[in-house]
Amino acid sequence: MPLPRPLLLSMLWVSVTLCYLYGDYFGLYVPGKIQQLLDGRMGPLGAVTQQVLLGTATMMAMPSLMVVLSLVLAPRVSRWLNIVAGVLFTASMLLTMPGAWRFYLLLGVIEVALTVSIVWMAWTWPRRAA
């Protein structure tokens, strides 16, 4: 018996979130990363400010929220929100991968596969359920 589409989407978002967390954690081991943090710099985003942290926190809260929203929103709303969020996170991952360390590339490929799967599952969600 196949799993309900909302449950599958939620499980995919859990996997995406965990990959993001592990990528950020392992990134702390990249030489110079801790010093960059201590110097108040946030990679390509530049200086750490409240606005930069708020923007980053907002963006990174989205996959975690999608875990729940995929289960509780009306199917039609959930479908479109999953498509939009999946495309957004696929694009953001693809933009951050060039020149990255191998661990990040591995996690990035997995994240892209997961978010593309989210878009596909939401796109092919049977209309009768939406």
Image: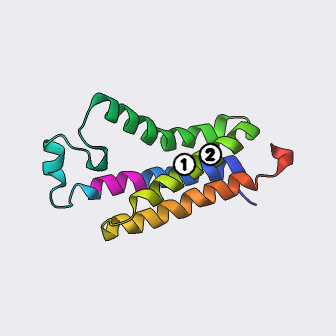
- Mark 2 Cα shell of 10 Å, populated few (<14), some (14-19), many (≥20): some
| Residue segment shown in magenta | 19-25
**Where is residue 15 drawn, in percent x and y?**
49, 55
Left or right relative to 45: residue 130: right
**Where is residue 43 drawn, in percent x and y?**
27, 49
Q: Could you tell me which quadrant the N terminus lies in?
A: bottom right
Residue 92 on the magenta segment: no
Residue at 39%, 57% in the rendered image:
96
Residue type marked 2: Val
Mark 2 = which residue?
Answer: 84
Residue type marked 1: Leu
Residue at 37%, 51% in the rendered image:
21
Q: Is residue 32 visible?
A: yes
Mark 1 touches mark 2? (CB < 8 Å): yes
Residue at 76%, 56% in the rendered image:
124
Q: Quadrant of residue 53?
A: top left
Under circle 2, the secondary element is helix
Mark 1 = which residue?
Answer: 88
Q: CA distance from mark 1 to mark 2?
A: 6 Å
**Where is residue 111 drawn, in percent x and y?**
48, 60
